[in-house]
Structures are given as C-alpha cells and as structure tokens.
Image (cartoon, helix red, strand yellow):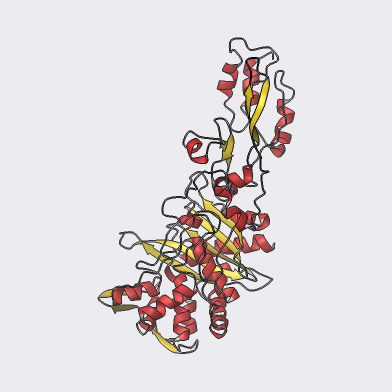
Amino acid sequence: MQDRASLAAALAQVPGADVARAIAGLSAPGLKPDAFVPVGEVDEARFAQLRPSLAPVPGIVFRRHGINAAATADLGAHGVGSIGEITAELLPRLGERYQAGDLVGLSGLEAAAEHQLRGAPSGEVHVVDGTGKVVTVLQRFAGADPQPLVTTLDLAVQRAAEHALDGVTQPAALVALQASTGDVKAIVSRPVNIAFDRALEGRYPPGSTFKVVTTVALLASGVTPDQAVPCPPDAVVGGKRFTNFEGEAAPSIPFRRAFAISCNTAFVGLASHLSNAQLGAAAAEFGFGTPLSPGLPAVSARFPTPVDAAEHAAASIGQGRVTSSPLAMATVAAAADSGTWHAPHLLANPAGAATAGAAGGGPSTTAAGAEPATTTAGAAPPPLDPAVVQTLRQLMGEVVASGTGTPAQVPGGPPVAGKTGTAEFGPGNPPATHAWFIGFRGDLAFAVLVEGGGVGGRVAAPVAARFLAGVHG
C-alpha cells in the first residue's frame, strides 16, 4: 500500500463497503504488514466489472470464497430466506446443540427447516486424567447428516414475477402456482427490506376477484351466462348504498357481460337471492376457511357469515369482512383453472420438512397471526362441478378479451383468463383501493396485488401481462 487516498477512492466502488472503517483498521495496533483487512464482498459478475480498476491499486488484494445465498434478493428476503450468525434470542430457542458463533437460518425456509438443513453433530463424553489423557469414553452421540430441502419454486417463473413488479412503487405481491397441483412456482413480496411477507401473510379484502366465488354460487343456483340482469348505477341493500366503481350502468345486460365489466350492482342484486349458506359453501369450495401450511407461515382466506343483508351484499363483491392473502387468491384462480382446489405448498418433500423442527429439540416459531409452517391434516374441498367450471372459465376469458382485464392480454400462446378487483379499504371518502388481478394461462395460475394501487384493471392487470410475457417469452 502506497497511497491511502487512492486506496480509499478505489474501494469506494465496492457496493456496501465501509471504506472509512477499513482504512482506520489499517492503523490498528500490532497489525502486521501482510494482514488481510476485509472491506466488502461482491459476486463474480460484479468482481469482473470492478477488477480492472481495483487490481492495479497497490494494497488491494482479493480472496475467493463460497457463501450460501439465495438466487435473488426477493427469495433472500421472503421465501428461501437468509442465514447468519446465531442471535442471542435464537440461542436458547434452538437447543443445546448450538453455541455462539454458529451460522443458522434467520428467516424463510432457512429458518423454518433449520434442523433439517443443519443436521446434528456427533460427539463423545470423555474422562481424562490430570495430564489430559483420555481414561475412558462415557458416552458417544451419533451425528446426523444435513438433509436437503427441495422446493417447488421455478427460478425462471420467479424471476419473471420479480421483473413484472419492477417499477411498482407501492407495496405489492405476486404469487404463481401450478394450477393442477398447488405447487408454488413464484412468490414475490415487495418491498424486500422489511420482514413482513404480504404475499403469504397479508390480509386484504379481495374486492371483485371474489366474484369468481359468488359466480359459482349463482351458476349453481340456476343463473345462466346469457340471463338478462339489470346493472343500475346504484343499489341500496339493507340501508347500504352500492355503486359501480367506474360508473357502469345499463338497464339490462347478459350476466356474462356483468361479470366481464364487474358490475357491482348486478351482483348484489343477484346475490340477494342466495342464502349465507350458499355463498359460504361456494367460498369453502375455493379454500376459504381451510388452514394453509405451504411450508412458511401463511394466513387462510376468511368468509365470516354475514350478519345482515347489507353485509351479505358487501361479501358477495369481496368487501365487508371477507379477507384473503395473495397466496389464497392464487389458489382461487388455480381452482377455476383446474376444477379442483389444491392446498398450496412450497416444499417438494413436505413430510421431511414438517418434522425438521423437532430434530434438534427446539420449538418452532411463526409470525404473529399466521398458521404454523407445518403440514396440517384436514379434508380438502371436493372438486367443483365440471359444468360450472367450464362456464366460469369462459366468463373469466371474456374479462380479459373484452372486459375490465384487457390490459392482461398477452399475444400468442394460450389465452389469458382472469378477474380484476378494486377493493375498498380505510375511512377515506371515497375510500382508497387495492388493485387486484387473479387469473391463469395454461396450467399456471397467479394473483397480483398492489396495495393502495387504485383500479385493478389499470394497475394489476398490466403487471400480470408483464409476468406472463416474461414466463413464456
């Protein structure tokens, strides 16, 4: 090292480097001339960019080493998670086989399956004499090799989902599933710099995306796609006034058109002929009320029984007390696609992961308000009526072909089918709205949520189009 100023200027190019601390460390008492003072870490791609400017500077040297890192920043923040040195809080919870300085899973699947991924150390208890010589071995402990954790994630689909949300400034989420199995192919929760995983743990009113559920109840009750229904500018039910978000109104339109343009007043009028039991049964067919245990903490969709006519009408359009996560709404789209609701799962070997937490004797933990990240036994909803499903798919196709979801169109390949949602929340007048779009293309189902994003067709549907173009492009 010949010039500390030049050295500092060169090191300032290293992302995340604490240059001032590193330069100060060079003056530490007793530091030998050949000591290695760490400054920062970069991956191979960034190293190739920086090396031409860093390598010629006297005093800068490089060491290569491997690290355990998620493939993308989104997976590192939510999903796969991260590892690091054990914290004082985790040390007593993980069990006596851990000690200060150990590397452990700190978040995501790395934490949920810590004991499976770590294995167990072997060891012996010795009796020694005064010189330290082993006199006898009292006990031997057999170790256990770490076991791999295989996920259902598809890196190409994951990256397409991440890129689809690039440029979205509000908090947002995108979840994609294989419709026929429930395998989670992508999970994105933005922003990545906070621990809350809104894709799995967020509770939101689903808004008009819930009309997929209400439509199944209506079709089962005898409503037909070509049945004429009124779409007035407003409707009063139980003393509560309902309007159409974008002012849609028509004296009479086919039900299929009411679905395509998401006419609220048509739906609350038709839903008045459904009982709470009929609407609740349809919700149950789409997994509402069924605990979700994909391998990480996740909340289930909820359909509380309406207490009066006004709440019944609100529930029919995904408002009131109805709530869901993006993950749960992705399963709704998947059920419409495949004809059967499948519980979502992130793990290809869930049996091993479910018992992983017990291997080291430490208790498992979950986020507040979320179901445990273990396999839960229970009855899955039965398959949907095939005739109803066929009609539902056609209706969802018309949403994208000529309704509120046209911005979700993707040229070439299978057609996109879906449902927009503009879900009101909060005390504002008018209330703020979350932007939703759920849908499917081929065997890939998905849900997009943009918190406070506005209109689902204008905001969430274009995100879906970018996602699908990235997957199939």
Can residue 249 be seen?
Answer: no
**In this rendering, position of residue 467 left or right of residue 424:** right
Q: Is residue 400 above or below residue 128?
A: below
Identified at 44% across, 68% down, the residue is 289
Q: Nearer the viewer, residue 368 or 211?
A: 368
Toward which corner of the image does residue 43 lie, by quadrant? top right
Going by the picture, which residue comes out furthest to the left? 239
Q: Quadrant of the N terminus?
A: top right
Q: Nearer the viewer, residue 135 or 8?
A: 135
Number of numbered tags placed on the structure image: 0
Q: Is residue 210 above or below residue 48?
A: below
Q: Quadrant of the C terminus?
A: bottom right
- How far across and how far down the image is residue 37, in percent? 64, 21
Identified at 66% across, 69% down, the residue is 411
Q: Nearer the viewer, residue 429 or 151?
A: 151
- How far across and how far down the image is residue 161, in percent? 60, 57
Toward which corner of the image does residue 276 lie, by quadrant? bottom left
- How far across and how far down the image is residue 188, in percent? 55, 54
**In this rendering, position of residue 41 left or right of residue 239:** right
Can residue 215 be seen?
Answer: yes
Going by the picture, which residue comes out furthest to the top? 30
**In this rendering, position of residue 120 left or right of residue 216:** right
- How far across and how far down the image is residue 137, in percent? 66, 29
